[in-house]
């Protein structure tokens, strides 16, 4: 979002909401149209290097998967006190698991959705622990992602002491064997609260993104922090994928700079526009037929060229469907498909409403939004 300079729709009042706008994810300043003309031999070489890197990544992923399949993996589970980083908060009990080189912790009352995923293959960790005075058990241990200040400290309760040394030995073993440690991978530490999500690499999105899938953004900047405080959400922008069998995935959005547009996902990556964001989530749309995706694509294309608008008056007037802000546009397309009830006001949907952290969105017609995946763009750096 940016400050609104000239938005005249609906005689909008001059208030703080009207001075916030969803900014396009397309960074024109970083990438001009002439960079998309016919590529020179040097550019072709760069493309070949990128292809080799992508093949290398796929090989790595295959090898990791093969290792996990061939080698029997010891699984540990138990309860630990997690030390809160906030002085006034008490330590809480969490259910924890250790398997396939990842440490995962859950709310003790809900073991279905993890609250933290520390995957040693995806990120290098520094591990330390404190023994009891008589050296009979482990009192506590800390896992710290290399490259950031965040620490995950766990205290061993009495009921878990008998297994405490086994936990420490296996964590040390998994870290030592992990791809993250052996290759000094620290890319995940760049992202805001990365441990909340599973990871996906951006080349994987090129292969699997379909029409209706989403990218949800947390933008860097003071104004965006203010926006998230007002909306009480961790996110401030959202776009939707459009995909045909004959072209690369396109990003479909409404922004204050350009209104409703679509542009290549490759263009977004090539411009390194992702550097403007603290975190980007990929969220697949599931249980939707191919025919419905084709129809959804047509509905989206029919909106291209329309304008942008965000104002408090939207909540009190009937929409003209001529101007949209980002999440309103996505909600409207979903509503046209019958995934969102017609009684819902599309302008009441904000980017955060489409994430796992918000319980509001329950799609109709058996459609379902999959889990949030954090997109890793820095894995080769």
Image: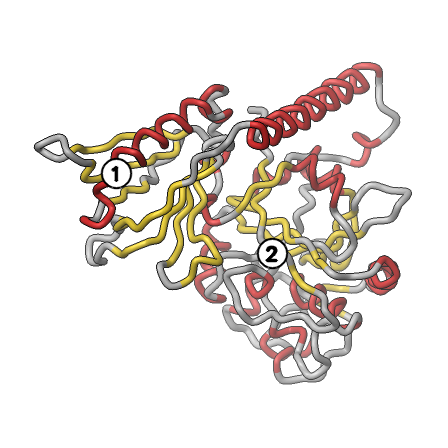
Res. 240 mark:
none
Q: Residue at x 49, y 48 (%)?
A: 221
Q: Does residue 123 appear left or right of residue 315 in this picture?
A: left
**Front one among 288 and 220:** 288
On the question of residue 85 being in view, the answer is no
**Front one among 77 and 120:** 77
Q: Residue at x 13, y 30 (%)?
A: 135
Q: Position of residue 168 (x, y in %)?
A: 30, 32
Q: Which residue is mark 1?
A: 164
Q: Which residue is mark 2?
A: 237
Quadrant of the image occupied by residue 297: bottom right
* In this rendering, the label closer to the viewer, 2 or 1: 1
Q: Position of residue 372 (x, y in %)?
A: 58, 52
**Residue furthest out toward the right:** 246
Q: For the residue labelled by badge 1, is the local secondary structure a helix, a strand or a loop?
A: helix
Image quadrant where one finds the C terminus? top right
Q: Position of residue 161 (x, y in %)?
A: 21, 42
**Front one among 126 and 299:** 126
Q: Residue at x 58, y 66 (%)?
A: 350
**Front one among 111 and 268:** 111
Q: Position of residue 349 (x, y in %)?
A: 61, 70
Q: Does residue 240 appear left or right of residue 357 in this picture?
A: right
On the question of residue 262 being in view, the answer is yes
In the rendered view, would you say 2 is above or below 62? below
CA neighbours of label 2 inside 10 A, class few (<14), some (14 to 19), many (20+): many
Q: Earlier in the sequence, mark 2 or mark 1?
A: 1
Image quadrant where one finds the N terminus? bottom right
Q: Residue at x 43, y 28 (%)?
A: 124
């Amino acid at each position: 979002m940016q400050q609104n300079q000239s938005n005249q729709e609906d005689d909008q009042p001059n208030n703080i909401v009207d001075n916030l706008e969803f900014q396009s994810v397309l960074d024109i300043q970083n990438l001009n149209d002439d960079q998309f003309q016919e590529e020179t031999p040097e550019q072709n070489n760069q493309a070949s290097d990128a292809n080799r890197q992508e093949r290398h990544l796929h090989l790595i992923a295959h090898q990791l998967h093969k290792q996990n399949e061939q080698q029997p993996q010891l699984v540990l589970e138990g309860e630990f006190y997690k030390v809160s980083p906030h002085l006034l908060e008490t330590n809480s009990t969490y259910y924890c698991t250790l398997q396939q080189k990842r440490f995962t912790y859950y709310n003790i009352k809900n073991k279905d959705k993890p609250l933290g995923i520390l995957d040693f293959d995806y990120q290098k960790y520094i591990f330390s622990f404190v023994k009891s005075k008589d050296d009979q058990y482990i009192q506590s241990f800390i896992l710290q992602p290399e490259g950031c200040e965040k620490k995950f400290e766990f205290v061993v309760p009495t009921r878990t002491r008998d297994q405490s040394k086994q936990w420490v030995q296996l964590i040390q073993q998994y870290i030592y064997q992990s791809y993250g440690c052996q290759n000094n991978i620290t890319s995940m530490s760049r992202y805001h609260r990365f441990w909340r999500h599973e990871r996906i690499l951006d080349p994987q999105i090129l292969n699997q993104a379909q029409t209706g899938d989403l990218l949800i953004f947390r933008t860097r900047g003071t104004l965006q922090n203010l926006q998230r405080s007002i909306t009480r959400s961790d996110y401030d922008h959202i776009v939707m994928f459009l995909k045909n069998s004959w072209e690369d995935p396109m990003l479909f959005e409404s922004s204050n700079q350009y209104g409703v547009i679509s542009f290549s996902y490759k263009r977004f990556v090539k411009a390194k526009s992702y550097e403007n964001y603290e975190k980007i989530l990929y969220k697949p749309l599931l249980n939707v037929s191919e025919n419905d995706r084709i129809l959804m694509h047509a509905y989206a294309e029919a909106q291209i060229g329309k304008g942008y608008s965000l104002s408090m008056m939207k909540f009190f007037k009937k929409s003209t469907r001529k101007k949209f802000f980002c999440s309103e546009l996505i909600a409207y397309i979903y509503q046209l498909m019958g995934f969102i009830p017609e009684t819902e006001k599309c302008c009441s949907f904000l980017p955060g409403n489409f994430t796992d952290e918000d319980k509001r969105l329950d799609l109709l017609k058996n459609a379902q939004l999959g889990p949030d995946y954090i997109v890793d763009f820095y894995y080769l750096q």
